[in-house]
Structures are given as C-alpha cells and as structure tokens.
Image (tube, rainbow, N blue to C red):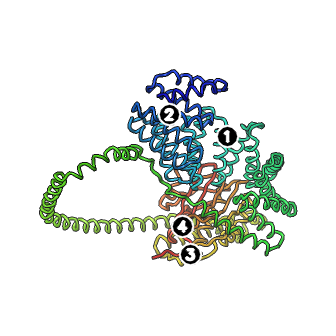
Amino acid sequence: MKQLLILAFLFVPIFVFSQNEKIDSLTVQIAYQNQDSTKVDTALMLINELYKANDYKKAILFVNQTTKLSKELNYTKGLAGSNYYKALIYANQNDYYNAIDNYNKSRNYYLQISDTLGVAKVSNSIGLIEIKRGNYTKGLKNSLSAIAIFEKRNLKSELSTAYNSLAEVYFKTNQIDKAIDFNFKALEIRKQIDDRNGVKLSTKNIADLYSVRKEHRKAIEYYENVLDILNPETDQDLRGEILPKLGSEYLRFNAFDKASDYLVEGLKYNRKQDNEEGILRALNAIGKLNLKKKKVKLAELQLNEAYDIALKIDNKTELLENYKLHITLDSTRGFFENAFFWQNKYYDLKASLSVINEPKFKTETEPLDLYNTGSSSIIAETNNSTKTSWLTNPITLYSLIAALLALTILLVFIYLKGLKHRTTITQQREKIEQERIRNEAILEQTHHLEEVNQVKDKLFSIVSHDLKDSISSIKAFLDLLKEDSISREEFNELLPELSENANNASSLLFNLLNWSKSQMQNLEPNPELFNIQDVFRTKMALVEQKIEDKRIVLIDESIRDFVYADKSMLEIVIQNLITNAVKFSRIGDVITISNQDINGKALICIEDTGVGVSRNNIDKLFNANDNFTTVGTKNEKGTGLGLTIAKDLVELNNGKIWVESTQNIGSKFFIELPKAASKA
C-alpha cells in the first residue's frame, strides 16, 4: 500500500521534532513494515496514541488508510479497530450519527471474530454516548452488557468509567438507591487503581445522594471524608462546593456553631475563587441559619443577594430553596402578602422541576443481548443476494406453493381430529376449577375462624394482664388515700406514677377498641380530601410536653398537600407513629416529619434517630399475633397493638405502610396514600 507508506514518510520529519517519542517510534516502524496484518496492528497503536494526544486530524488520516489496507487483506480485526477509533473521534467532535454508525460497524466486526472484549469495549462506548444525549434506556442497556464482561475480566479502569456513568444515569432518573450502589462500586474500584481524583468525586457523589435521601448523618460523614483528602492547590472548586453543603447538613440538626463555621468559611472561599454557584449555595444556607437565630435583617440581605445570583446563573434548585426561605422570612416579619407572592413562585417552580426529574425509562432495565443484536444485521447483509436468487426461480416458487398446500391440508386434518379431545379436556378442566374454588372457600373460612379465635385470645390476654395491672395500680393508690394510710404529701409524690398508669390505661383502651373493630370488620372508612399538614400539626402539639421532657429535636419538613382518606382514621395512625417515635427516642435524638408527592400519591415519612429495631423484630411490628412489644427509653409501656392498628387503618384507606430501621441508628416509618378517589 504505497499511499500509506508515502503518508508515513511525510509525517516522519514532523514527528522527529515531536515531544511524543512513542508516536515518532511507531511512525518510523510503519514506514519500514510490509503490507500485512502486522502493519495494521502497528497503525492501530499509532492511531491510539494520536487519539490520546487529541490530534484527531492526523489520526483520521491513518484510520482511513488502515481501513483500506484491512479490506485488501480481509483482516477483520483491523476493520473492527479502525472503525472503533473513527467512532471515538466522531464522538469527541459531537457528530452523533457518524459515531453510532461506526460503533455498530466495529461491534459487528468484533462479533464475527468472537472478540468478547472488543464487543464490550464498543458497547460501553455506545452506552456513554447515548447517556450523554439523554437516551438513558439505550445507554443503560449497552453499559450493563459491557459491565458484565468487564467484571468477568476484572478490567478495573473500564469498570471505573462504566460504574460512574451508570451512577449518573440512575441519579438523573431519580433512582437514588441504585445510584448509591454504583457510586460505591466505582469508589471501591478507584481505590484499587489509586485514582485519587475519581475517589474524591465518587465520595462527594455518595454524600450528595445521602443528602437527597435525607440520611443527613451519613451525608456529613462522607462530606468530611472528602474534605480530608482534598488538595488545597488543585481541588479548590470541589472544596468550594462541599463547604456550604456540609454546613447545611449540620444546620438540619440545629448544630449552629458547626454549621456557622463551615458556611462562613465556604462563603469566604467561594468569594475568593469568584465561584458564583458556591456563593449562591453558601448565601442560601447562611440566610437559613440567621433565620433560625432570629437575625431577620441580616438574613434578608443574604437571601436577596442569593436570589439575584440564582436568576443570573439559572440555578433552579437553589432558586427553589431561596423561594422557600423568602416565604419563611416574610412570614416571620408579618409581611403575609409578600409571603404569598413567594409561595406561588415556589410551587410553580417545584411543579416544573418535578416534571423534569421524572424517570425517562422503566426502573428495571435488562442488559443488551450483544450477540443476537449484532449478528442479525451481519447475517441479513450476507444473505441478501441469496434471497433474491431463489425467489426469482419459477420451479422453486411452484414447489413452495405445493408444499404449503399440502401442509394446510395436514393441519386441517389434525385440527378436526384434535377438536374432540380439546372439548373433553376443557370439560375436565372446568370440573377441576370448580373443585379448586370450593377448596379455596373452605380454606378461607378456616383461616377466618382461626383469626377470630386469635383476636379473642389477644383481647383476653391484654385485658386480663396489662389493663388489669394499670387499673389495679390506680385503685390501690386511691384506697391508700381513702384509708389515710399515706399522707397528702406522700400521695402528691406518687401522683406522676398514678398519672402514667392512667395514661397507659387510656392508651390501651384507645388501641384495643380500634384494633378489635378493624379485626371484626366493623370499621368502614369515610374518605374525604383534606390537608395532611393540619393533621401533623395537631398531633405534634399533643406530644410537646414529652418532647420537652426528653429534650428531643422535632423537625417539621411537611408541606401543604392533600390526601383522600378517612381523616379520623389517619389521625389515629399519625398519633400512634409520632407517639412511638417519642417513646423510642433518647435525650437529644431527632424526629423528622415530612411528606411529598411520589407518582401522584402522598408519601408520608416519620423518622427518628432513636434506638431502632433489629432485623429479627421488624417483621413482628405489624403482626398482632406475635404479641411483640417493648418498653420505651423511659420505661413507657405498650400493648404491641399500635402499629397493627396503623396497618389495618391504612390498608382500609387503600394505602400501604412499611418501616426501614437499623438498631441504635433509628427508624423511618412510611405511609403511602391516594390523593384522589380511585376510578372504578
């Protein structure tokens, strides 16, 4: 191939003066090699070096010549490699269609020679370019198929890139749990290959995701881990991003001193770096801090500056936070008309963001079947001429018609013969189905009788033990006073214990009545549309004294939203969950109450950082038959019925309730309810 040889000689003088010795060496090798597969392999190595040096113009010249020589030699591996590098170059030049076209050609060539690694490498590249363009389903399928091969071959550098890309896809489509999993996988690989920049970014991403999932203690842990490994010279932008975020996380626990330190440092740092996004994030958080400290004028200055920056750089997420803080600011000052103005802007922007952040594809995506997908197009091309030839042959065509006619007659005969058998089988199936339905009805009646019996046993057990103890204790106190066995002063000292017993008896009766009604199927919901935030506030007021006694931090993150359910039933559920959170929280723990719209349904979360529940006991929480109950952190008693009642009442209102808990870390109780009447 004279043209390639001439091209190589022309480039020799240029590369002699180049700083890249490897490029020079490979160029000289090509000039003196014979025109065989070895020359193609050397050319591919040179193209790779030119690509890494971003010298795309020279790289594409060698790609074209290498493709031509590979065709002359019928060297499939060379065609696969040259098309792959051509696709990479097009991708870097944002020429999507040419890039995809050459990626597919390359993958088909790799499939022909059964080069599994080559197929995976191309599929991962296709995945990256599709993800970049927002075609998440196609990108995810390609990347998942490539990852399976990279994992099998333990190719850590490729896995690092692939894991990180998948984590980004899952984050952009609101699949936070999967995003966290793949960020952890990327972090582990990056530690193994000593990719320090990758370790920093993965750790920061994990902290961001924990913050989104409202696991703020974990977010703090990982943000502080990033700060510890940052280089003050090269990681200035990353430090400017993390400092305000870390301060905001501490602010959620009212750790004002810690929050202030990080936020003030973050604001100064970002002003020095002239980083408007970092300044915006820090100003919003410091404004929130000053609102909590009642420094209203200072907060106003900071939030107004943040508002101007958010509009300037079009940061919608921070603008939404700024609107929320302005609502609080003007409500605190009594400027309710202004607060209403900010509230309208807040809900308009929130609605638009929720549409943007909706997932673009199904959450469960299967990997691409590389071999069936790739090989089909090759087979179609190679067999195209064969199809044309036999279809135009009259003898072949008549033979085909005769065969089809004979086959039709045979199928009709088989159908008629089998019709009688099918009728008999259908009748037998109907009889079997009737027997099955009868058996199921008998089983259902048996289960119902067993459940009623268990309800009876449970009621007698509680009434004969717990309720009897509480009432007997109250009566004993009163008898002592009546018989003058104790003085008035001694009785006054026993009053708190008497009050606690009365509360236990009242709570027990409250739960027993509601639970027994629901078990006997006498409870019918009367659904209506109401604001769930009103229920939260009413029920939070009932536990104010206990919260103050235990010095618990109660955070209200609820928003105005409507649910369609029986209000009185939901009040019972919320009261049980909030009371439970207080009961199992220690001094200084945090209880957070929140709600949000998820796919057109209301999702309620009551979270605490209390003692938590062990894995072995989680399944017992909602089952009355397990008779599972524990005392609170101040020896508060219970019947074990509160959560059983909550489950029954939620399900009566077409909802779901579940718990996520870790022992000694805390619990999250979730309730999902409809926001409108179901369409019959």
Tell me where residue 625 appears, x and y as whole percent.
47, 60
Kind of residue at badge 1:
Lys
Tell me the residue that label 2 is attached to. 65
Kind of residue at badge 3:
Asp
Numbered mark located on residue 200 in the image? 1
Tell me the residue that label 4 is attached to. 645
Q: Secondary structure at mark 1?
A: helix
Tell me where residue 20 appears, x and y as whole percent.
64, 26
Q: Secondary structure at mark 3?
A: loop
Which numbered disc, 2 or 1, marks the residue that appears first in the sequence? 2
Kind of residue at badge 4:
Ile
How many residues crowd mark 2 within 10 Å: few (<14), some (14–19), many (20+)?
some
How many residues crowd mark 3 within 10 Å: few (<14), some (14–19), many (20+)?
some
Which numbered disc, 4 or 2, marks the residue that appears first in the sequence? 2
Tell me where residue 645 appears, x and y as whole percent.
54, 67
Q: Which residue is painted at 57% across and 61% down in the image? A: 358
Tell me where residue 365 appears, x and y as whole percent.
47, 52
> Do tag 4 and tag 3 residues touch (Cβ < 8 Å)?
no
Kind of residue at badge 2:
Gln
336 above or below 558? below
Tell me the residue that label 3 is attached to. 566
Q: In the shown orientation, is residue 311 left or right of residue 384?
A: right
Report the Cα–Cα distance between label 2 and label 1: 42 Å
